[in-house]
Image (cartoon, grey):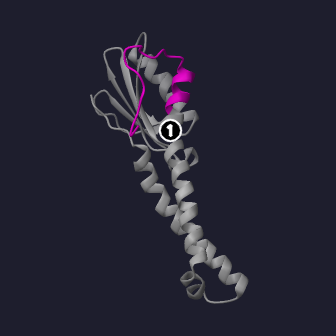
Amino acid sequence: MQMRPRSFWGTFVLSAPTAGLAFSTASALMLAALRRTAIGEVFGESQALVAGCAFGLFFGLFMGWKFRSITTSVRFDGDLEVFLSRLALHLAEVGYHPEFPIGRVFTFRPDFAAGLMAGRLTIAFENERATIVGPITTVHRLIDVLAVRRDSRVASTTAGE
């Protein structure tokens, strides 16, 4: 089963313009309030736009690195139902909740507390192997908590690198 994770650049493109626009608007509002002028006059100046572009660039780079998705494959020993219950319990603790499964593919979506940019976690089961696609921090934490061993023949891959 082939699932494509969200790459560094995909995350960057989603987060940088949004953050830049929000920051430049906030900067323009703040400068307009400090100068006691109309926001249109301040927005026309380059200070708010430069600040927004710089913030958006750095925020996008950080978010792209921190929330990029990876694909990894792990083996699990024993019963699929036991593995799935441990998985669902841990994911519920960190704010991920199951959506409707499609066959042997399970998708977990984050709630608001888990993070706006966290992204969905998808797990596909084939024989005694689980392929996990999701945000790098969540996937690594999940593997550590479940104490599953990585399959030595299938290495973790990071999208876009």
Mark 1 neighbour density, 10 Å: few (under 14) some (14–19) many (20 or more): many
Q: In which quarter of the image is residue 48?
A: bottom right
Relative to 69, does residue 9 appear above or below in the rendering? below
Q: Mark 1: which amino acid?
A: Tyr
Residue 154 part of the magenta segment: yes
Quarter of the image with the C terminus is: top left
Q: Name the residue under label 1.
A: 96
User: Outermost residue toward the top?
Assistant: 78
- Give the residues in magenta: 139-161
Picture residue at 55% right of the left edge, 49% below the top? 62
Q: Which of 82 and 130 is in front in this view?
A: 130
Residue 50: image quadrant is: bottom right
Along the viewing direction, whichever of 121 and 35 lies nearer the viewer: 35
Q: For the point 48% across and 29% down, which residue is it?
A: 88
Under circle 1, the secondary element is strand
57 with respect to 2 (left or right):
right
Where is 12 relative to 78, above or below? below
Image location of residue 59, percent across then percent down: 56, 55
Is residue 116 at all visible to an observer of this figure? no
In the displayed structure, does residue 97 sit left or right of residue 131?
Answer: right
Residue 19, x across and y down, in percent: 53, 62
Q: Quadrant of the N terminus?
A: top left
Please state the horizontal and vertical placement of residue 107, each as a whole percent of the image.
39, 36
* Percent x, y of residue 118: 50, 44
Q: Is residue 40 above or below residue 134?
A: below
| Foreground residue among 98 and 63 | 63
In the rendered view, would you say 81 is above or below 140? above
- 80 horizontally vs 50: left or right: left
Residue drawn at the location 58% of the way across and 88% of the way down = 41
